Amino acid sequence: MRVPRILFLSALGATIIHRALAQTAPPAPLPPLDAATIQSIDTFVTAELAREKIPGAEVGIYSRGRVLLAKGYGLANVELGVPVKAETVFQSGSVGKQFVSAAIMMLVEEGKISLEDSVTKYFPEAPASWKPILNKNLLSHTSGLAEYESGERTGPTGPFYLRLDFTEDELATKIEALPIEWAPGSKWDYRNTNYVLLGILIHKITGKRYDEFLAERIFKPLGMTSTRLISERDIIPNRASGYELDDGQLKNQEWVSPTFNSTADGTLYFNVVDLAKWDEALYGTGLVKQASLDRMWTVYSLNDGKPKPAGYGFAWMIGDQNGHKRIEHGGAWQGFTCRISRYPDDSLTVVVLTNLDASDANPGMIAHVVAGLADAPLMPAKLTAVPDDKPEIALALGKILDKLAAGEDIRPQATAELLPYLTSEAGASVKKRLEPFWPGGTLTLVRRTAVPGVAGLFNSTFRLTKSSNSMLVNFALNAEGKISGLGFSRDREYQ
């Protein structure tokens, strides 16, 4: 099953920081990692690759321009037995969106675009209902536009069939035909559609494709020599292969047309060597002004003036880890997953790149634990059983699992924001995944957090076990009792 290049926002949630992350007195860089710390990181990463069946990974650890670790683990190409090294090139998935965000802020600083512009200024053929959608709504995923990358829309009978090529104009026309699911700025939900439009917008304004503009203004100036647009036809040194697990068996990534490997929602190659240069640049103002960085790293407020619960800025997710500021983003596409997690107050950044699909790999958890191994105060807590003072949530989840296991449609019980992901294809996949666990499994609460800014609502993580099998289920209900979050992932030791 193809996993779209979404940022997976698990039901673990994030503690939101309602202010910019500018530093008035930058902390000093961390000292070099000692041999014991590097060994502990090696041991953990190697064990996670084996547990999650990830063929290969790269780990980068940086501290304000100093590379503390840049290392490969496992295999870049299973068939040829090629090991991963620091220079191995992986796909970006949605981590690529942060470069697009920076590019838009460059154009804002140059007066070529305004965040307050209606997108109809650049897409004059769009329906009149698009007029309230502003550029800042695209950047913050508050536009209300539907997700183009849903199963029905990207399948053989859909308008965005992933094995067909389309021009930019054709893509724009198809997106203009998508529904608006809520009033712009009134809600938040992650939509790749927004960044496809931003890439087209960059082309319209600059006369250069989005990747050409990024190369000219970001990659070349920073010396990011391996970062570029995906091309399966070009000869690209050190390119890794992407993989998916199909019924437990490792398979090569599925093929998509060049069109869908060139849109601005996440279609880049990079490695941990180049990302060290990107991270260093984000501590300065050589690319964009500090005010622009602050805007990117500030939780976007909805029309009611409240920061959105997801803790999202412009292509960055803002939250914390053990009370320490964390700004990060994940990505997934074509058998690759990755995470960049920055801890600005701790002078630490961790990058994890893997060549396994998002249904099976968890680079975010790996990044968070590696951060804790490098800097002990950041170490995440372990996922162990906690008292459940709201048993009605587990009861509701059990009823949902009954329906999923029986192949029933749960969409009538889901929020509108969740509907695009509850496709028939996804339902069949979940039903198959549940077979070893449900019915007859046991739900044990391992974490519960309040939804920030929404009284009485909670995100819950349960460990679902049956015999020797276990996995995690992330679950959330809104105030009306509708399912607002539902996710399944491999069991793991840490939050």
Image: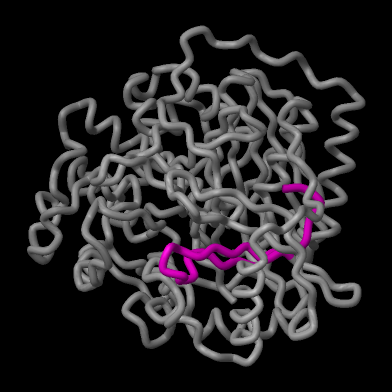
Q: Nearer the viewer, residue 229 or 23?
A: 23
* Residue at the image point whose x is 92% and y is 26% from the top: 36
Q: Nearer the viewer, residue 269 or 485?
A: 485
From this view, report whether residue 96 is shown above or below residue 177.
above
* Residue at the image point whose x is 38% and y is 26% from the top: 294
The verdict on residue 479 being magenta is yes
Residue farthest to the front, as pictured: 389
Q: Position of residue 39 (x, y in %)?
A: 90, 33
* Residue at the image point whose x is 77% and y is 28% from the top: 374
Specify whether 405 is left or right of 176.
Answer: right
Q: Position of residue 398 (x, y in %)?
A: 66, 77
Number of callouts:
0
**Quadrant (top left, top right, bottom left, bottom right) of the N terminus:** bottom right
Does any portion of residue 94 appear in the rendered image? yes
Q: Position of residue 309 (x, y in %)?
A: 43, 47
Q: How is the image coloured?
A: one colour
Does any portion of residue 202 appear in the rendered image? no
Image quarter for residue 18?
top left
Q: Nearer the viewer, residue 18 or 4?
A: 18
From this view, report whether residue 188 is shown above or below residue 179.
above
The verdict on residue 36 being magenta is no
Image quarter for residue 426?
bottom right
Specify whether 43 is left or right of 182.
Answer: right
Specify whether 132 is left or right of 290.
Answer: left
* Residue at the image point whose x is 33% and y is 36% from the top: 103
From this view, report whether residue 50 is shown above or below residue 403.
above
Tell me where the magenta segment starts and ends, as one range: 472-495
Q: Nearer the viewer, residue 263 or 215?
A: 263
Image quarter for residue 72?
top right
Q: Position of residue 451 (x, y in %)?
A: 50, 50
